[in-house]
């Protein structure tokens, strides 16, 4: 699997050898300048009794303005994304049968689900709790105790059962209540004392949830990714919680044009001088999404294949043949989950059948923190974009200026939203919108895994900036969702504290030592320990501190 610094970023496929060529997504587009001829300035006032020459001047001027307007429209048609279908050209709206609940949504990476605590998650405005029972089976409930509506994700696991920590009610299996401490010994547990359940399935290392309570699960809708099942395919996966809407996140993921500009020099392949026009070819449009090829304008063929599929799954694939004639496959997979208004969660999975030697040199946490850096570079743009959409309350057609040479996939996505948005809690389409009916919920008290992680070593929740419950904070966006990175941060904290204590003890001994030789040895060792403290502190900062652009730093 290729491992460059931008290895995690959307639509980037750096090859693992020089002969295999550079990343496909390095081909980001430079926006062509629009040459829009303005209409002629208004004429000065005409005399009340115009002469013949005055009428002639007015006629010539009016003709000039009409010609200029036509020129503007012609220029726009050449560079802006046009209608996607014959229905659009006729001004007709195409509506598909769609219900957002009758879909499978990616909840979490299977490897990151804790064994000893419940996990609180959301899909749109639905709050869920996920946990493993004593047999290792996964169960998903509505995150609400039927007693007094306390969050079950604030609870704990007792002998494989989920316990609400408010009054100690316990639940298991299909949501059945099996213990109420306050109930008399001779009383039966009420049948209504049960929780609503949701069907979950583990597929290819990801746990998916079926959100409908009315329609039985359609298991054929669980996504299957062919490349991930190929022999020798290896991937690196990471999870990120982000402070903007899932539709804006998906736009960003299917936009290769911004990479050379926004991520300039983040690795050796992203350079702003490489920004250039891109070519796109839509090969498929259905009620469930779209697909097509894309590449640089100068490419002989379009080497990248992108597919978007409902509800929010995006993948970008590339194939190439090495010098030995062996075909290799690379995939960038983005599994997005709406987590509420202005919030989303993303599972990123990059992999291939050929693995770079760099992947064996650098630890996984290094690539995870670099992925966080990439998302932080875009965060300011996307958060502000989210604010404008909510404030303006108009379709994106009235706000965006989509170029054929950079924004084709973005336009396709918003037009797909036009077809299915009526079946979502809210949407912002190309021509249509539906605003949220429910007010956004902002929780100031962390719950579930967030509370557990923030209250554990190395710091108490709410103390200091690193562990403040804030989605603009890298620790809460990624580290608490990644078992590997949590363990690494704790390990570096332990090493830092141990080395600091050892360095202090060695320094004290050096002061007390009478022999000069021992002073030198002890002070040299103490200096090495202080160096280790610095390295551990730097590693912790890499995993928990946000990236800030140079021109924005104080």
Image (cartoon, helix red, strand yellow):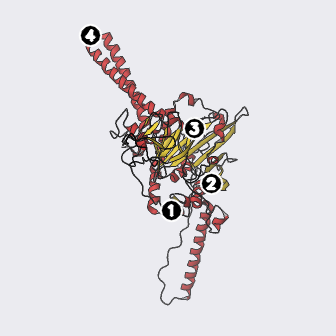
Sequence-wise, the earlier of marks 1 and 3 is 3
C-alpha distance separating marks 2 and 1? 19 Å
Crowd class of label 4 (few under 14; some 14 to 19; many from 20; radius 10 Å):
few
Crowd class of label 1 (few under 14; some 14 to 19; many from 20; radius 10 Å):
some
SS class of the residue under badge 4?
loop
* Residue drawn at point x = 67 percent, y = 65 percent: 86
Which residue is labeled 1 in the image? 434
- Considering the image in quadrants, where does the C terminus appear? top left
Tag 3 and tag 2, C-beta contact below 8 Å: no
Which residue is labeled 2 in the image? 288
SS class of the residue under badge 2?
loop
* Residue drawn at point x = 52 percent, y = 48 percent: 337
**Residue 366 locus on image (x, y percent):** 49, 33
Sequence-wise, the earlier of marks 2 and 1 is 2
Q: Is residue 265 visible?
A: no
Residue situated in front as seen by the camera: 58 or 187: 187
Q: Is residue 254 above or below residue 78?
A: above
**Residue 191 locus on image (x, y percent):** 46, 47
Between tags 4 and 1, which lies in front? 1
Q: Which mark is residue 514?
A: 4
**Residue 453 locus on image (x, y percent):** 40, 37
Tag 1 and tag 3, C-beta contact below 8 Å: no
Q: Is residue 431 above or below residue 446?
A: below
Sequence-wise, the earlier of marks 3 and 2 is 3
190 vs 61, left or right, is left
């Amino acid at each position: 699997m290729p491992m460059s610094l931008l290895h995690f970023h959307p639509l980037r496929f750096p090859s693992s050898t020089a002969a295999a060529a550079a990343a496909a997504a390095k081909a980001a587009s430079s926006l062509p300048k629009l040459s829009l001829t303005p209409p002629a300035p208004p004429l000065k006032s005409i005399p009340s009794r115009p002469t013949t020459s005055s009428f002639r001047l007015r006629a010539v001027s009016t003709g000039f303005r009409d010609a200029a307007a036509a020129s503007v429209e012609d220029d726009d048609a050449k560079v802006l994304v046009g209608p996607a279908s014959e229905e659009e050209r006729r001004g007709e709206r195409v509506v598909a049968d769609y219900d957002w609940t009758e879909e499978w949504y990616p909840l979490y990476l299977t490897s990151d689900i804790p064994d000893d605590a419940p996990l609180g998650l959301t899909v749109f405005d639905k709050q869920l709790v996920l946990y493993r029972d004593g047999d290792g089976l996964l169960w998903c409930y509505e995150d609400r105790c039927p007693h007094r509506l306390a969050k079950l994700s604030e609870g704990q696991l007792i002998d494989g059962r989920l316990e609400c920590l408010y009054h100690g009610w316990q639940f298991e299996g299909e949501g059945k209540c099996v213990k109420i401490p306050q109930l008399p010994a001779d009383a039966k547990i009420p049948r209504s004392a049960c929780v609503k359940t949701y069907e979950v399935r583990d597929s290819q290392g990801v746990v998916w949830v079926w959100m409908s309570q009315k329609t039985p699960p359609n298991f054929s809708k669980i996504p299957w990714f062919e490349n991930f099942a190929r022999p020798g395919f290896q991937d690196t996966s990471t999870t990120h919680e982000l402070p903007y809407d899932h539709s804006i996140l998906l736009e960003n993921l299917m936009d290769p044009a911004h990479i050379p500009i926004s991520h300039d020099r983040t690795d050796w392949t992203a350079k702003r001088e490489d920004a250039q026009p891109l070519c796109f070819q839509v090969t498929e449009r259905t009620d469930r999404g779209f697909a097509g090829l894309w590449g640089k304008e100068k490419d002989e063929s379009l080497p990248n294949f992108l597919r978007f599929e409902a509800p929010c799954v995006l993948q970008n694939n590339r194939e190439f043949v090495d010098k030995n004639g062996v075909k290799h496959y690379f995939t960038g997979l983005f599994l997005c989950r709406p987590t509420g208004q202005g919030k989303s969660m993303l599972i990123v999975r990059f992999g291939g059948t050929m693995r770079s030697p760099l992947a064996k040199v650098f630890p996984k946490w290094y690539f995870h923190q670099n992925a966080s850096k990439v998302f932080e570079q875009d965060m300011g743009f996307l958060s502000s974009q989210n604010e404008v959409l909510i404030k303006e309350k108009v379709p994106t057609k009235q706000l965006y200026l989509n170029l054929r040479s950079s924004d084709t996939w973005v336009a396709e996505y918003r037009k797909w939203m036009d077809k299915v948005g009526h079946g979502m809690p809210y949407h912002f389409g190309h021509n249509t919108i539906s605003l949220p009916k429910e007010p956004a919920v902002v929780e100031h008290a962390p719950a579930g895994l967030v509370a557990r992680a923030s209250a554990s070593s190395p710091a108490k929740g709410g103390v200091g900036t690193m562990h403040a419950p804030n989605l603009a904070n890298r620790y809460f966006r990624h580290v608490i969702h990644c078992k590997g990175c949590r363990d690494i941060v704790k390990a570096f904290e332990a090493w830092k504290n141990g080395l600091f204590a050892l360095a202090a003890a060695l320094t004290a001994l050096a002061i007390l030592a009478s022999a000069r030789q021992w002073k030198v040895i002890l002070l040299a060792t103490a200096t090495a320990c202080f160096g280790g403290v610095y390295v551990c502190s730097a590693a912790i900062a890499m995993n928990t501190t946000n990236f800030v652009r140079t021109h924005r730093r104080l």
